[in-house]
Every structure is written in C-alpha cells, then in structure tokens.
Amino acid sequence: MPPSEVTGPPRAESAAFAGLSARQALGLGALVLAAAALHAWKPGLSATLGHHLLWSFFLLGILWRWWALRQQALTIADREPGPEPTEPYSVIVALRDEAAIVPQLIHRLSQLDYPQGRLHGYIVVEADDDATASAFHNAAPPDWLELLVAPPGRPTTKPRALNVALSRIERGLVTVYDAEDAPDPEQLREAAARFAAAPISLACLQAPLRVRTSEASTWLERQFAGEYGALFEVVLPAMARLGMPMPLGGTSNHFRVDALRKVGGWDPFNVTEDADLGFRLWRAGYRTGVLSRPTWESPPAGLKAWLPQRTRWLKGYMQTCGVHLRDPLGLGSRGLAALLLTIGSTIAAACLQALVIAWLAAVLLACAIQGVTPVLPVADAALLVLGWTTAAVCCHAGSRRAGVRYGLWDALTSPLYWGLMSVAQAHAVWRLATQPFHWDKTPHLPDEEPTAGRGPMAAVIPGPWLQGSPTLRKSSAPAAGPTTASSTAATAGSSRGTARRR
C-alpha cells in the first residue's frame, strides 16, 4: 500500500487562512480599547507604557543573546561516527528554473556518504520546467536520485513541492537541501547516529548553514555571512541547549519521517515554511536539536537578489507569527518566548531600524548645524549602543566559529545593513496584503572554481572550535563552500534575520 498523500496542516493551522482568528480579533480589540481608556484617563500614559514595554522586550533580547554567546561552546556535540546506519534516508531538493546549477548540485549530492541501498533522493520540479528536468537527465545523476515532477496545482511554492516528495516516503529519515547547497558528505551519518541515540521525541536536527566568503566578497555578502553566523553558530545552538523550539533554516533540516507526516509536512501557503514547521513540531510534543557538520551556501548576488529574498522571509515571518499567535497558550511559555525572541523580534527590528537610524542622523545633523551638543534620552541611547554592540559581537563570534570573513569594518558599518531590513519590511507588508502566497525566488548560479587565495574552498578557514572537534577533524574539507542576528541589532533602538535561507 503506497504512503498517504501529504498536503500540509489543516487550514486553521495554516497560513492559507490569512485573516485574524476570532481569538486574535478579540484580543486586538481589547488591547485597542484598553489603550484608548488609558489615554482618556491620563493622556500620554498608554504611549509611555508602550515605550517601556518595547524597551524591556528589546533589553530581554539583548540579555538572551549575551547568554547564548557564553553557552555556544557547549551546545554542539562532538560525536564520533557510530555503527553503520540502518534507517533508510531520503533527500529532497525542490527546484524551479535551476537548469544552470543542476550539474553542480548533482555532483555535490553524489558526495553524500551513506550506505548503498538505504539512500534515495528526489529532485522535484514543476510540470512546466522542462529546462531543469533536461539538465537533470544530462547530468548523469547517481542511481539513488530520481526526478519527480510535481502535478499542476496551487500554490507553486517550495513547501508544496516538498510535500509531493514526502507523500512518497513512508518511513526512516528525510532531509531537505537547496539548489546551491554543499553539504558536508558525512552530515547524513551524523544525523542518523544522533537520531538512533536520542528519544523518539527528537524529531528534527538542524545543520549549521554557512555562507562562503573570500577576499573578493562584497560588503553585503560579508554582512549576510555574519548574520548567518550569529543565527546558526550562536542563537540556534543555545535554543537547542535550552530545549526550546526554533525557526528552522530552509535547508539541511533532518527529520524523522513519521513525526513530519504526523504534523502534516510543510505548509504550502507559508513562504517561510521552515520557520513555521519548527514551531508546529513543538506544538505536537517534538523537540529539535542541532548538528555540527555544516552545509555551505552562496550569498545573494547583490542587492537586487537580496531584497526580494529578504522581503519573502519577512513576509513569511509575519505569516508564521500570525498563525501561531492564534493559539499562543498552545506554545507554552518556552515556545512563546522562542517565537517572540526570534521571529517576533526580527519583525519588530525591521520595522524600527531605519526609523531609529534616520532619527539619530536627524538629531546629530540638527545639533551640528546649530553648534550645540546633542542630548539623547539616556535609557534609549544606552539600549541603542548595547543592542548594536551585541549584534556585532554575535556576528563576529558566529563568523569566527564558522570560519567566514567578518572584520571590524563590517561590524562598525553593520547598522547600515540592518537599516536595509526596514526597506524589505515595507515591501513585505505590501506583499502580504496583495500577494500573500507569492514566492519571490532567489536566482542561483554555479560557484566559481576555487583558485589560489580565493573561491569557495579558500574561504573555508576553520576556527579554533572546529579544530578541537573530533567529529570534524576526521571529515574531509567542507565541500565547495540565515532570523535573528538583525533582530539583535535592532534591539538597539528602541529597537533573523533570521536566517534563512533559500
């Protein structure tokens, strides 16, 4: 009997329902009435109270990230390869208009080390994507990898394509990769060993995503790499240590198939289906951990590629918050704290960051023209400095642990990068209102061949924490080789992203 079809969570738990639930509408109405009553009783009190609450929320985020920095060295387990894995392992890659990068992808997937006969993979393409399908057949894929054409349907999103493949997988373990990924060849073995040794409640393991940098990398690419470093090397491992749910990255998530099927797979209507899935697994009683073997990715090729990608991420974060705040009590205290400290703070940061920078620049300029010393609110100025400092330290520490480039100049100019988040946030709000399920695809091109002193391989410079890992010492060099760091920064100002991915 073939496995049952997977189509995503029920509509009530999906981004397909785009409006407010009755509970959310009542809560929002009560909040507005309470604010109006406070204002009528004592004008200005509601604004002051809101300012104090927001200030406290961002301060809590800053303190949380300092704790995460202190705990990082203890969060990723070093594990020697265990017995030969027995679980069947499936690999899914959803592609759309990726003909140019298919040969590179096939080569990298062919390097995965897992027992023959227990590994199977699906390259999922849309029915009208003949170019990518042809590129797959011409690339001489290994026997364990097959092409799967998604039947016509809506929405035409990555999570829908993933569910098409999951519908064919009945048991074992499954992972997801993206077109530009270069996973560590032993990543599957590490995940299989972790699952075998863990209780059944461990449903997902997230591998660290690292962005290739080199001496030729642009400022935007280094900022993106630093953001990924803060998220995947600092924040997510700390959340795993605390047993908290986490917004997953869009790739290199490893799942128990039965747990993934139980929660309905991926939400095809959520454009950050990964972040949503991490919290849905938590609601179902499952837990998430992290791996040590990384997957390397390429950064977006300039602002023209970065902005649509970040717009989609922020739109998806708003979808995810909207879905899970329909029943916040169902998350529990740790789940709700995780949602607010990651996705919630990223959205708040993106809304406020450019406004804070513009306000600060206007104050300094006006004072310079008038020849007076600027006077800023002490508490707000302190939060601003502490928030930006915390964000820069997280990015630097994460980048160093990942072995990617992120220097002093990048740290000092990082507020300009976080200010770009506000531009993406404005786009995201508009797109959420007009095209909630539209998928802004990130274009990918094959990586340059490594050359002396530059290129993907030259960029891989393991930091001290990797050199001390028995697991990673035994592995070969990484194959040619992102919600939340930006929200750290945004704590600054009176006001991650996260990460992710795709």
Image: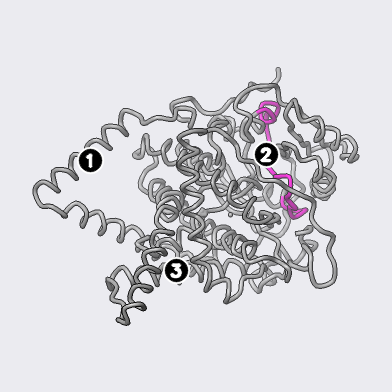
Taking 107 as reference, is 317 left or right?
A: left
* Placement of 133 over or under 343, stated as above or below: above
Lower sequence index among marks 1 and 3: 1
Q: Secondary structure at mark 2?
A: strand
Q: Residues within 10 Å of mark 1 (few under 14, many from 20)?
A: few
- Of tags 3 and 2, the one toward the viewer is 3
Query: 283 or 431, which lies in front?
Result: 431
* Placement of 6 over or under 459, stated as above or below: above
Identify residue type, mark 3. Answer: Trp
Cα distance in 3D space between marks 3 and 2: 40 Å
**Residue 367 image offset from top left, x and y in percent:** 33, 76
Identify residue type, mark 2. Answer: Leu
Residue visible at 73% across and 37% down in the picture = 95
Q: Residues within 10 Å of mark 2 (few under 14, many from 20)?
A: many
| Numbered range of the magenta stretch | 164-187
Identify residue type, mark 1. Answer: Val
Q: In the rendered view of the protein, which quadrant contains the N terminus?
A: top right
**Residue 344 image offset from top left, x and y in percent:** 41, 49
Report which residue position mark 3 lands on: 388
Cα distance in 3D space between marks 1 and 3: 32 Å
- Of tags 2 and 1, the one toward the viewer is 1
Is 165 magenta? The answer is yes
Lower sequence index among marks 3 and 2: 2
Cα distance in 3D space between marks 2 and 1: 47 Å
Report which residue position mark 1 lands on: 32
Q: Secondary structure at mark 1?
A: helix
Query: 428 or 137, which lies in front?
Result: 428
Q: Secondary structure at mark 3?
A: helix
